[in-house]
Image (tube, coloured by chain):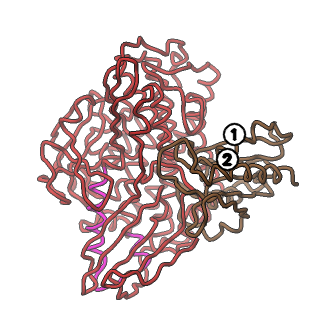
Chain colours: A brown, B red
Amino acid sequence: MKSKTLLLGIGNPIRTDDAIGVMVAREVSKLRLPDVDVEEIAASGIEVMELMLDYEKVVIVDAIMLPDGKPGEIMKLEEGDFSSTVHGASPHGVNLSTAIALGRQTAPSRMPKQIVFYAMQAEDVDTFSESLTTRVRENLPSLIDTVVRELARD
Amino acid sequence: MAGPIISDQKVKTDKKRITIDPITRLEGHGKIDIFLDENGNCKNAYWQVPELRGFERFCIGRHVGELPVLTNRLCGVCPAAHHIASARTLDAVFDAEPTETAHKLRELFYMGQFTHSHIAHFYALAAPDFVLGPAAPYEKRNILGVVEAVGVPIGAEVIKHRHYGQKVQEIIGGRATHPVFGIPGGVSKPITEEERTEIEKMAKSCVEFGKFTLKLFEDVVLKNKDYMALVTNGNVFYQTTNYIGLVDKDDKVNFYRGKVKVVDPNGKELAKFDPKDYLKYIAEHVEPWTYMKMPYFKPIGWKGLVDGASSGIYRAGPLGRVNVSKGFTTPLAQAAYENMRSVVKSLGVTGPVHHTLAYHWMRVIELQYAAERMLELASDKSITSKDVRGKVGEPNEGVGIVEAPRGTLIHHYKSDKDGICTMINMIVATTNNNAAIVHEVKKNAMALIKNGEISPGLLNTIEMSFRCYDPCNSCGTHVLPNGQLALEVRIFDDEGNLRKSLRNF
């Protein structure tokens, strides 16, 4: 039986700051929050959309790299913020926004009513390492706290 | 549904450099730079990919037994291929021959990967170009546009069967995307009779979906004279290269095990070798402008970015596999192969098919094979045997080669007596195609851009050439907005100064 809410941490645990989402998922998982399922995934696109099915609310946490972002900066993004990226897609299939649109196109009744994204600006995602960079590591507790508060909201 | 849009209005440009960055619909952050001459003709084109740092250093000093799990983290797209290649390599490192049941379970798992991967590629990446057309509006040219055109019920079938491929991997491999079951000499757990019947049921459905996909390809592409003109155009989407792929003892395609076969542009066998001998046949050329090496057939040597029989460049992946082989071991895939041979024969092709867009054709034939082979293996009740691990010897050195969905994948490890990794070398599938992709992009750009006339559809046509190879640039996952880091176009003047940078993120 699925819970009402899903926390989904996206990232690759051996690509330095790409692990942000996975790290948050692992920490939140330890809290055993009621009616919240926690998953981590090192893929995106349709796989992520399939994990979302049949939840009322999904909170996604991932690393982000914006050209002017400061490492460790936390951002909250809504589904609409990705609308401009719904076109040709990525990881060997489709990107996340396209996948969500595909879910709403092919299985509308099973898609969550609310999808919220939290992202932290990464500094390095190209080096193979299991350690986060300093500023990201220092700000991770704030991101975890923010995500836990979001999970408590309806 | 409306017909595809194949060409659009050209737009004149006076820019000397056109950059499409990042390449749409590709894993990773690659870019194509096109340099024009004074007359607005393409002088040069480069395909570049970002550098990933430190994987070798990350692996050395760890136990080699960890490598099937670490190497599959290289990639968010084909972790299963790395996992299986790594397990095959550990078989060699530990001189541990897997039991027949273990081989069957690994191969069954791997057919799930091919089914999933080929469905994703064909419907999400290739179909927008074919169903909607290379010059269809940018915002429509994606899987959403495809589903809109073919109908939601078919879209749901695509998602269902892609998921079946994932589910088979999850049941056997322990996890859907990053498997953990491959160990030296076998697998970590058997499957139950209940799991076998569940896989068998999904495999039956995948065989039917394979038939549907072949029919769709025939209706949309083979029966469309404009597309066939594009597919069989000898100027663009065409290279006379050597080919590489794994074959079984009868020279039939095999994704999981066999010998590596290389043929020349006329189909003549140049080599057939065991994985452990790969360094005698494959060497890697380095270019200063890209970190990705360019492998070539060593006995011929590196002759530059040129095709033809005197060049050492080879192509891997679906086209390579079909061109080195005598077809498939399963009936429906073999029938589709024979049909393909008959169609190309009517076009005067009796040897290897050099038409790059035929990659998509070979891929849908391979999808049929993967589904049929999945059903064969899942129907074999002996696959539930508990005998899933062979005897393991002392660690040393080993090479494992499998066919990843996008081409030949080579892993090579050295271990000390305690099992600690002292050397790791990998030639991944996209790297095996690197020289051919770069050559193809340049050749197409030279043929398709004249007098500064450029249009979005034309540029996408150039992208189509390497989309055929299903290249995977980064062997990484993504960063929000999930790999598709949005479009960046950089415009340089004729002195190389950056005048404008446009981003949609």
Taking B388 as reference, is A108 left or right?
Answer: right
The residue that mark 2 highlights is A9
Front residue of A69 and B471: A69
Q: Relative to B448, is A73 above or below?
A: above
Which residue is depicted at the point 33% across and 55% down? B291
Residue A152, image x and y in percent?
86, 50
Residue A29, image x and y in percent?
75, 38
Taking B160 as reference, is B267 left or right?
Answer: left
Please state which amino acid type lies under the numbered disc 2: Gly
Q: Residue furthest right?
A: A154
Please state which amino acid type lies under the numbered disc 1: Arg
**Residue B449 placement: quadrant:** bottom left
In the picture, the quarter occupied by the N terminus of chain B is bottom right
Residue B112, image x and y in percent?
52, 36
Disc 1 to disc 2, how far (Cα)?
A: 8 Å
Front residue of B402 and B286: B286
The residue that mark 1 highlights is A26
Q: How many marks?
A: 2
Bounds of the magenta span? Answer: B433-461
Chain for numbered disc 1: A
Q: Are discs 1 and 2 less than 8 Å apart at CB?
A: yes
For label 1, the SS is helix
Residue A27, image x and y in percent?
72, 40
User: In the rendered structure, does residue B30 fall within the stretch colored magenta?
Assistant: no
Could you classify mark 1 by the number of other residues whose Cα lies within 10 Å: few (under 14), some (14-19), or many (20 or more)? some
**Residue B411 placement: quadrant:** top left
Residue B210 visible, this angle: yes
Taking B285 as reference, is A119 left or right?
Answer: right
Which residue is depicted at the point 45% across and 37% down? B71
